[in-house]
Image (spheres, rainbow, N blue to C red):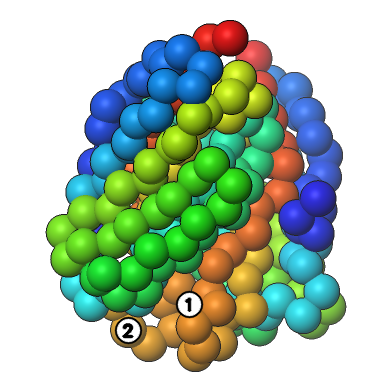
Amino acid sequence: EDQVTQSPEALRLQEGESSSLNCSYTVSGLRGLFWYRQDPGKGPEFLFTLYSAGEEKEKERLKATLTKKESFLHITAPKPEDSATYLCAVQGGGGSNYKLTFGKGTLLTVNP
Amino acid sequence: DSGVTQTPKHLITATGQRVTLRCSPRSGDLSVYWYQQSLDQGLQFLIQYYNGEERAKGNILERFSAQQFPDLHSELNLSSLELGDSALYFCASSVGTVSLNTEAFFGQGTRLTVV
């Protein structure tokens, strides 16, 4: 069974203070690793897909990296509007099963 | 806006009742997924449909059922509701074919409150 563990559960940063969120996973045949951002009461918003170890993707102040066992979401010089829950998910297996298995998320708070 | 539409946004109902949640996927997406999100459990996969057929089942209770119609919209039926069924229910859609672009896009959810 696919498993995803995210750490820390919560992270409080000052504006401009860079940090990283961790996503450790076990999956049978990784098809993709996904990062989402979720604001309170809203649906998860897609950020990145990573497919193979060594891959990196960037979007504004966010950079996602992938190894064979974990992924990191690096946040550079965050702003208060980056405050949200960041979710990591894996898609594994074969055939036509495209379900995502999610971690419980990291609640990021950026103080001005 | 993800392009995935869910209705209703909010639903309050009594224990023992039955409700239907509706999802319209993004244009061109063939796969629809249903997820349940509660405070203590996080996002839990319920069921996936691809082009009208059930493709994967997760932790879906026997009291719950779903279907995908020929126009690709999907409905999630929840019956004999219990207090513990109160949660956010999300629908997501993806292209769902064998390709690299398999990311799923989520709707805004239906908040179900069982009283």
- Say what amino acid the circle numbered 1 marks: Arg
Image coords of residue A102 (percent x, y): 38, 48
> How many residues crowd around disc 1 within 10 Å: few (fewer than 14), some, or many (20 or more)?
some
User: On the rendered image, what quadrant is the N terminus of chain A found in?
Assistant: bottom left
Nearest the eye: B72 or B93? B93
Give coordinates of residue B60: x percent, y percent: 44, 51
Chain identifier of the residue bearing label 1 in the image: B
Residue B55's label in the rendered image is 1
Q: Nearer the viewer, mark 2 or mark 1?
A: 2
Circle 2: residue type: Gly
Give me the disc on residue A75: none
The residue located at (77%, 67%) in the rendering is: B26
Look at the numbered disc 1 and give the secondary structure of its residue. strand
Few, some or many residues within 10 Å of mark 2 (<14, 14–19, 20+): few
The reply to whether label 2 and label 1 mark residues of one chain is: no
Picture quarter with the C terminus of chain A: top right
Compared with A4, B103 (above or below) is below
What distance separates the C-alpha of mark 2 from that of mark 1?
12 Å
Q: Is residue A67 left or right of residue A51?
A: left
Residue sitting at 65 percent across and 41 percent down?
A: A43
Give the vertical position of A31 relative to B37 (above or below): below
Q: Residue, x 64% and y 25% (percent of image)?
A: A81
Judged left or right of residue A16, residue A12 is left
Q: Is residue A4 visible?
A: no
Residue B2: tell me if it is visible.
yes
Verify CB contact (< 8 Å) between mark 2 and mark 1: no
Q: Chain of mark 2?
A: A
Residue in view at x 69 percent, y 71 percent: B68
**Residue carrying label 2:** A94
